[in-house]
Amino acid sequence: MNAAVVTVGDELLAGRTTDTNATWLCERLTDRGVSVDRITTLPDRIGDIARVVNEYRAEYDAVIVTGGLGPTHDDVTMEGVAAALGRSLEEHDGALVWLEQEGYSNDDLTDGTADLPAGARALHNDVGVAPGAVLEGVYVLPGVPSEMRAMFETVESEFSGTPTHREVVVIDEPESALLDRVERLRAEFDVSVGSYPGEFVRIAIESTDETSVERATAWLRERSETVSGDA
């Protein structure tokens, strides 16, 4: 299973808010064996949201969109997703019933709070108010991190794939000196290899086959000046 993550918000693009949602989602998805192939941040513009969601839903098994939910003037994500899917926005009866059960009457709710793309499955917001939605592989979640995380956990079981095994070897050598060894790792063990320089060089070895990762890791450690306690 592969996925794209789309975060929406002018404040993200202006640097006033740190996008922790994408990082958290990627970690959870990766742990479940889902390959995240895109992370895209968009402004609060209906046209941009519609264009990107429409493109990504054709390419990926799932598209997760966070941010811009609610009834205020700049909360346009639902409208953008509806446009991408060729749906109208409609008041969702199930969302209204759930909100009423939570103690919100129609008089308490701002117009548009429960508007979702026609035919969508509502995702209830146990931490906030604005509901999320699922339709045609597109998952729409709130932007408030606590709300987003709680809502994602209600659908997390719908995301699955082949887990990737990963080991990291920390080496006290110049990155340029490791080029030949990295190439041999890739050729001989059928693993993906990432090289991350800093005070030391961190070589990350990954594969869906745990034995290949273990063999490649052992091979590299035997031929390198590793740092004690590498991880």
Image: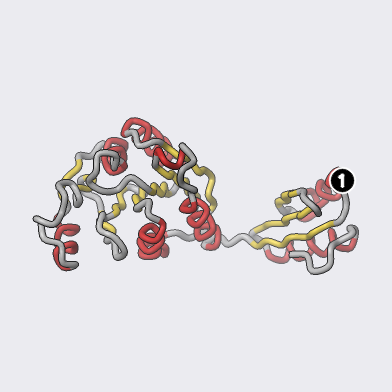
* Picture residue at 29% right of the left edge, 65% below the top: 126
Q: Position of residue 128 (x, y in %)?
A: 29, 60
On the image, numbered disc 1 is attached to which residue? Answer: 180
Residue at the extreme left: 107
* Picture residue at 26% right of the left edge, 54% below the top: 130
Q: Position of residue 114 (x, y in %)?
A: 19, 52
* Picture residue at 36% right of the left edge, 59% below the top: 147
Q: Position of residue 74 (x, y in %)?
A: 29, 39
Tag 1: residue type?
A: Asp
| Viewer-proximal residue among 180 and 170 | 170
Q: Quadrant of residue 58?
A: top left
Determine whether, in the image, residue 66 is placed left or right of residue 113.
right
Quarter of the picture containing the C terminus is bottom right
Label 1 crowd (10 A; few <14 / some 14-19 / many >=20): few
* Picture residue at 41% right of the left edge, 57% below the top: 145
How many discs appear? Answer: 1
Q: Position of residue 54 (x, y in %)?
A: 37, 36
Label 1 sits on a secondary structure element that is helix
Determine whether, in the image, residue 5 is placed left or right of residue 44.
right
Determine whether, in the image, residue 15 is placed left or right of residue 137.
right
| Viewer-proximal residue among 166 and 208 | 166
